Image (tube, helix red, strand yellow):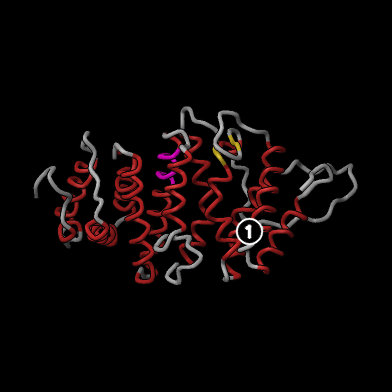
Amino acid sequence: MAQSESPPLGKFLASSEKATRDQAVKHLVQFFSEPAGRVLSDDLELAKLWKGIFYCFWMSDKPLVQQALASELADILLKISDPSSSLLFLKGFWHTVVREWHGIDRLRMDKFYMLIRRFVNASFVLLISNGWSPSLCEEHNAILRSAGGPLCPSDPRMPQGLTYHLTEIWLAELDKASAAATAQKPVPLKLVLETFSSLAAKTPNKATYQQIQANLLEPLLSALSPPSDSDELPKPKRPKTSHAEDYPHLLANCSLVPSDESLDKGQLRKGILEYIFEVASQEDTKDSNRRKLYAICKAYIDEDDDL
């Protein structure tokens, strides 16, 4: 194989010989790490390359080997010199995962969940390192919500299991990426939640909506809500969430839109409630989903909030 003129062919990445696969991955990383920057703009060539990468990971065995390979592949996003080119590589990843998802057997599912975690985390690191550029965030969101992406409400190929997994890890991986960053601008929460809020508004699938509410919206609002005071009169019971976390690193440096100034938890909570209310009010929101989104606002609103 040539060392820098072209990426490794899929047949090398998908070889049954581990040594051949390892050499192909090494060449792949080298190819995209070139200072001049490498990009595959042809969708067909990118699809062929990613099919080879997918089956390279498919054939990896032993947990430590899988973990190392998952990290190595996700880190390619951060080695490509041009951020938009990184997102093209990410687009190839998501389109391949969506296309191949239903062929992943039960025994291999956990390692692909891990690979997805690594790519979600690397995507956030990429956005953080570029100062949460609004245009780059929009490119990233467009990949997720467009046809072939994992959060497209109108694409019948969208695997529900993949969507559910993303709702479960999204905020946790953002919190990890925020913790690892030495310095960063505040995380723009509305941009981070945009694809999920759009899916929550438009999905015809009740289970998909419920996963977004239970794994994203409610845990975030719970983390932003003030602790209850036992001396106060009891307030209406808020929904219980089994995945609620504090997200300390994320919420320590957050805004609603790209900004140089972070907001406190009270400002963030009110802003997210207003955002959910706005999404619910949109004309193309499904009526059944609209009612549920309004119910979230009602459950978490405080007396001093004005929506």
Q: Residue furthest left?
A: 2
The image position of residue 6, as x and y in percent, is 14, 48
Residue 40 in the image: above or below residue 292: above
Residue drawn at (80%, 56%) of the image? 237
Q: Is label 1 in a helix, a strand or a loop? A: helix
The image position of residue 245, as x and y in percent, is 62, 47
Q: Which residues are magenta?
A: 121-127
Residue drawn at (41%, 45%) of the image? 123
Q: Main secondary structure of the magenta part?
A: helix
Label 1: how many residues lie within 10 Å, few (<14), some (14-19) or many (20+)? many
User: Circle 1 is placed at which residue position?
Assistant: 213
**275 lies left or right of 44:** right
Q: Nearer the viewer, residue 231 or 93?
A: 93
Kindly indicate the quadrant of the structure image that contains residue 48.
bottom left
**32 lies left or right of 154:** left
**42 lies left or right of 261:** left
Q: Residue furthest front?
A: 283
Q: Amino acid at mark 1?
A: Gln
The image position of residue 187, as x and y in percent, is 54, 38
Kindly indicate the quadrant of the structure image that contains residue 285.
bottom right
The image position of residue 304, as x and y in percent, is 82, 42
Residue 51 in the image: above or below residue 105: above
Residue drawn at (17%, 62%) of the image? 16
Check if residue 180 falls in the magenta segment: no
